Image: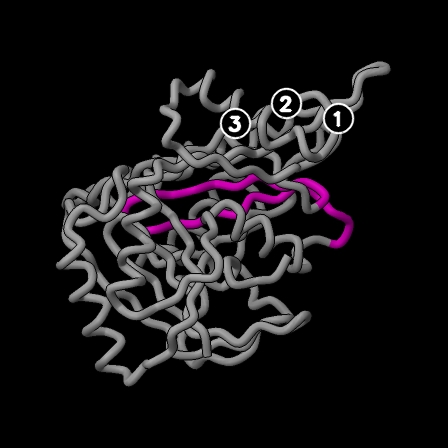
Amino acid sequence: MPLSIEIRTRQLQVVQTTVTKNRVHYKNTFSVDLEEGWVDAKGIVNQIAVVFALNQALESRGIKEKKCTLCINNHSVIYRELLIPKVEDKRIPFIVRSEMIASLDLTTDHLVDFIILEEVTDGHKTNLRVLAVAIAQKALGSYVDLCMKLGLRPDVIDTATSSVIKLVEKSDLTKAGEPIIVADVEKDVMRLYLFEHKKYILIRNTKLNEIEDGKKADWISDIEDNINKMLQYQFTRESHTGVEKVFFFGNHPLINEIQDSVKDNLSVETSLYPKPDFLSGGEESYLPYLNAIGAALRK
């Protein structure tokens, strides 16, 4: 079974998957902890240490699979939403790249990709709302080098946001496409994704600090504040429809307490992200591995 590997700053999330057109079967889920400084915005800094850690994890489980998908989920990926004129398909990459370089002052060694989110019509003018992604060639090269040193062959390199978009598109989370928030709560960061009618609207990233002694309630309150800002933002949109539900996934040990507290204090329905109908297998929780599973999905 091919591997899908999510690369975070302080952890690798690994899952074996078999993907067909309508089904995903998974097994052998595991995490590999990374030391601070091994991975940063420049990519993998300590290649020897990361190779050794992942190789040990694979060997101890007897995994010899060579095909893999990479899901990049750290600060080496730069996101920007753009509104560009609707033009011929062949011209879109050039326009997106030019806009990203100009607006973010990127160097020419950055690779730029994009997802077309929707068409937006204003009067007689039609634009495209695009989610653009940039990554330095050196950072991307470090992830590919990791695979090469382990004898792995990456056939897809995805980002966490693209992964969540695919995941939500294939999941039945609402009856009529009501607005929802999908919250990925990791040990060091929370990512909030807003969707309406299964369409991606917005992402909000929040750094999570260590919980100080006796201040867990304050720590959870900070999380609630960030979710509440996303709830309030939804009311400013054209539909003026409130968020129906907040779905949580990730690997944070307090994820159950967080979702219960958000439900009680923000008066919004919450739940852990339900196991999608297309997903089968696995004896352990799928929640920490949904980014890796989403990256493995076929568009």
Q: Give the mark, 2 or 3, whose residue is nearer the N terminus.
A: 2
Three-letter amino acid code at disc 3?
A: Arg
Residue carrying label 3: 97
Viewer-proximal residue among 217 and 80 = 80
Q: Position of residue 234 (x, y in %)?
A: 62, 30
Residue carrying label 1: 120
Q: Residue at 39%, 26% (x, y): give it.
A: 108
Distance from the alpha carbon under mark 2 to that under mark 3: 13 Å
Query: Magenta residues: mostly which secondary structure?
Result: strand
Distance from the alpha carbon under mark 1 to that under mark 3: 20 Å
Task: Please report contact status of discs 1 and 2: CB closer than 8 Å, yes or no.
Answer: yes
Q: Residue at 57%, 34% (x, y): give it.
A: 131
Q: Position of residue 67 (x, y in %)?
A: 43, 71
Q: Secondary structure at mark 1?
A: strand
Three-letter amino acid code at disc 1?
A: Val
The answer to which image quadrant residue 151 occupies is bottom left
Toward the right, the furthest residue is 124
Distance from the alpha carbon under mark 1 to that under mark 2: 9 Å
Q: Is residue 52 left or right of residue 84?
A: left
Q: Compared with residue 206, is residue 104 higher up or lower down, i.e. above or below?
A: above
Q: Compared with residue 127, is residue 149 higher up or lower down, i.e. above or below?
A: below
Find residue 83 and name its label.
Answer: 2
Viewer-proximal residue among 256 and 81 = 81
Q: Residue at 64%, 70% (x, y): give it.
A: 277
Q: Secondary structure at mark 3?
A: helix
Q: Compared with residue 137, is residue 91 higher up or lower down, i.e. above or below?
A: above
**Bounds of the magenta span?**
175-197
Total count of labels? 3
Q: Give the mark, 1 or 2, whose residue is nearer the N terminus.
A: 2
Q: Residue at 66%, 37% (x, y): give it.
A: 117
Three-letter amino acid code at disc 2?
A: Leu
